[in-house]
Amino acid sequence: MSTPQRFRDRDVVFANGVRGETIDIPSANPLNYWQAISDPTAMPRVTVDGKLFLPAEAKGKSPVVVIVPGSLSIAASHLKHAQTLVGMGIAAFVLDPFGARGVTSTVANQAQFSFAASAWDVAAAVGVLAGHPALDRTRIGLQGHSRGGSAVLTGVARLFCETVHDRALGVRAVLAAYPWCGHQFLDPDVGATEVRVIVGDQDDWVSPQQAQGYVQALRLRGADATIRIVAGAEHSFDREEPIQHVPEASVSPAAPTGYLADDGAFLHPTEGKPDLKLTDRDLAVYALKAGYGLRGATIGSQGEQPALFREEMTAFFRRTLLS
């Protein structure tokens, strides 16, 4: 069996001639959030990468949006979003969390690397891009899809990101597309970052209600946070692909939330006490034994749903990064 080509080895050129530049991101593989926040020197290190696409006729430093894929890795839809943003005058960095780890998909097993590792990738990318000479460090946005949506939400939590990059650095805006919100800090402070969540009401990978709860927690903490629930939309409704069933998907959208103490330790849903040894897998096993685990889920779009997403994305980043 041939090894799939890594994203970094692809020559990606948009229709307007803009070519992606591969950029390395020094990152890590923390066991859990506690290790990431409280014992970061113990983390195994890894260098992930991605491609930066700069607007062809940029005047001065450009704003940038980091696009983070979900469990199926980088898809044509992510590159199309990047091309759309570049056409607006916004640089786009498409992050590849998979290639350097030798992973092609986490659909059947989300524990191949931790959600803390995904969030570390995001915050590390912000730190690297903030120093790029063509980019404006005061106008950085994030757009994450599914697992990537979880990563961008955690990646801007102040308790987390201040461990990874300069504490003075802040992301301007986050668009989390159908994110899994099963891990949440008890103190969800995101500082001045504006957060927008968009999710379909027919999503069977993640819980729209859990996303609502997280957005409300952000609001109560003082954040500018909003959510849009799209009627009739399934998971990944921004993809221009027919609705299809993914039989190998392992999901538990109705499982209780795993909350995180300030030091990153999980609070087990049935115990309520911080335990620094708990991992993603421990909570996943609990959810499975408690009857929340399901096999099989649905992705895809119908009608004008991809256009709806594109309009939401462009309006959000035009207002937050260009105005």
Image: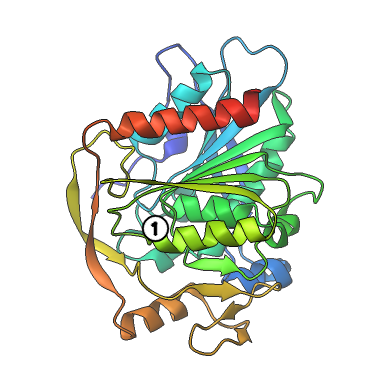
Type of the residue with mark 1: Pro
| Residue at disc 1, secondary structure | helix
Q: Position of residue 283 (x, y in %)?
A: 45, 78
- Tell me which residue sits at (47%, 50%) in the image: 148
- 163 over 121 or under it: above or below: below
- 51 over 253 or under it: above or below: above
Name, please, the residue furthest toward the right.
168
Say which quarter of the image contains residue 251: bottom left
The quarter of the picture where the C terminus appears is top right
Q: Is residue 56 left or right of residue 171?
A: left
Q: Position of residue 209 (x, y in %)?
A: 41, 62
Q: Which one is nearer the viewer's eye here, 233 or 67?
A: 233
Q: Is residue 122 left or right of residue 42?
A: left
Scheme by which the image is coloured: rainbow
Q: Which one is nearer the viewer's eye here, 43 or 289?
A: 289
- Tell me which residue sits at (36%, 32%) in the image: 308
